[in-house]
């Protein structure tokens, strides 16, 4: 179930910030983060989900992504691993077309061996208390360990402020996560800049990496950018 396919644009977050890429956003998520900026993929209390999703054959999705000639694709959501059979099929087709494939996930569903074999990088974003969900709901240890075992995971934590950094350190210590990226929460440029400035020195001091949300700095909350 597809929410949207867009690009070429740039990867706005993380290890390949600024890199030309295509995005495939899948519909559906079993989480309910308070700050979710893609609630139209899952929140039926606020959106008519049928207005924001369609069923497309994997071959059609691959064709659209390859036509973007971006050399990289980010499969995101929602939670892509709810559809990981189709994601593995898509990623395999893209890799065959010489496209680098990254998957963005909450890290709460363990990836299958078939998916791991065709993905270049998992951008795993475990949810902190500021997401508004109970720890029991947002932290799935077997899934986190499964991503660690892939050797393909980078860990991206959304932070509202410096008050979230001790919690990230607890995740780091519990699981031995590395590398860690901290990203300010926000959907407007002022908030991203203010929180980036607040987080930068403490993040550097803890030995982590900081990423802004470059697409938000450039285009605000505009969909499809
Ligand atoms: S896991 Fe991601 S898509 Fe799902 S509710 Fe949280 S922020 Fe939104």
Image (cartoon, rainbow, N blue to C red):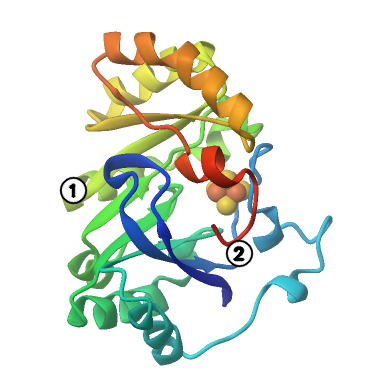
At x 25%, y 54%, the residue is 121
State which quarter of the image contains the C terminus: bottom right
Task: Establish if 124 lies above or below 84.
Answer: above
Judging from the image, what secondary structure is the residue with disc 2 in?
loop
Give the residue displayed 40% in from the left and 22% down from the top: 168
Q: Which mark is residue 149?
A: 1
Q: Quadrant of residue 130?
A: top right
Residue located 46% across and 40% down the image? 214
Q: Viewed as shown, does residue 8 lie left or right of 148?
A: right
Q: Nearer the viewer, residue 27 or 219?
A: 219
Q: Which mark is residue 160?
A: none
Task: Note whether 101 is above or below 107 in the view shown.
Answer: below
Few, some or many residues within 10 Å of mark 1 (<14, 14–19, 20+): few
Residue 217 rendering spot, x and y as whole percentages? 53, 37
Q: Is residue 179 left or right of residue 64?
A: left
Residue contact between numbered discs 2 and 1, judged by CB atoms under 8 Å: no
Callout 1 secondary element:
helix
The residue shown at (66%, 31%) is: 132
Mark 2 vs mark 1, foreground winner is 2
Please determine whether, in this image, residue 104 is positioned above or below residue 163: below
196 left or right, relative to 145: right
Estimate how packed mark 2 is, as few (under 14), some (14 to 19) or many (20 or more) residues with alpha carbons within 10 Å: many
Q: Position of residue 96 (x, y in %)?
A: 19, 82
The one nearer the camera, 188 or 84, is: 188
Total numbered circles: 2
Give the x, y percent position of residue 177: 25, 31
Q: Quadrant of residue 91?
A: bottom left
Pick whichever, 225 or 51, lies toward us.
Answer: 225
The label shown at residue 28 is: 2
Instruction: Give whichever of discs 2 and 1 has the lower sequence position.
Output: 2
């Amino acid at each position: 179930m597809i929410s949207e396919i867009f690009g070429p644009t740039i990867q706005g977050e993380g290890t390949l910030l600024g890199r030309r890429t295509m995005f495939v956003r899948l519909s559906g998520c079993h989480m309910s983060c308070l700050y979710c900026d893609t609630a139209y993929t899952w929140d039926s209390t606020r959106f008519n989900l049928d207005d924001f999703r369609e069923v497309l054959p994997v071959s059609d999705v691959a064709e659209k992504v390859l036509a973007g000639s971006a050399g990289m694709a980010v499969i995101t959501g929602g939670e892509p691993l709810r559809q990981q059979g189709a994601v593995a099929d898509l990623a395999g087709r893209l890799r065959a077309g010489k496209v680098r494939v990254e998957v963005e996930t909450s890290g709460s569903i363990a990836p299958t061996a078939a998916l791991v074999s065709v993905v270049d990088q998992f951008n795993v974003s475990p949810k902190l208390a500021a997401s508004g969900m109970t720890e029991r709901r947002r932290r799935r240890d077997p899934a986190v360990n499964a991503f660690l075992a892939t050797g393909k995971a980078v860990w991206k934590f959304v932070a509202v402020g410096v008050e979230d950094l001790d919690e990230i350190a607890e995740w780091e210590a519990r699981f031995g996560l590395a590398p860690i990226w901290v990203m300010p929460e926000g959907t407007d440029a002022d908030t991203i800049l203010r929180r980036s400035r607040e987080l930068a020195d403490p993040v550097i001091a803890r030995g982590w990496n900081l990423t802004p949300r470059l697409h938000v700095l450039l285009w605000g909350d505009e969909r499809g950018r």
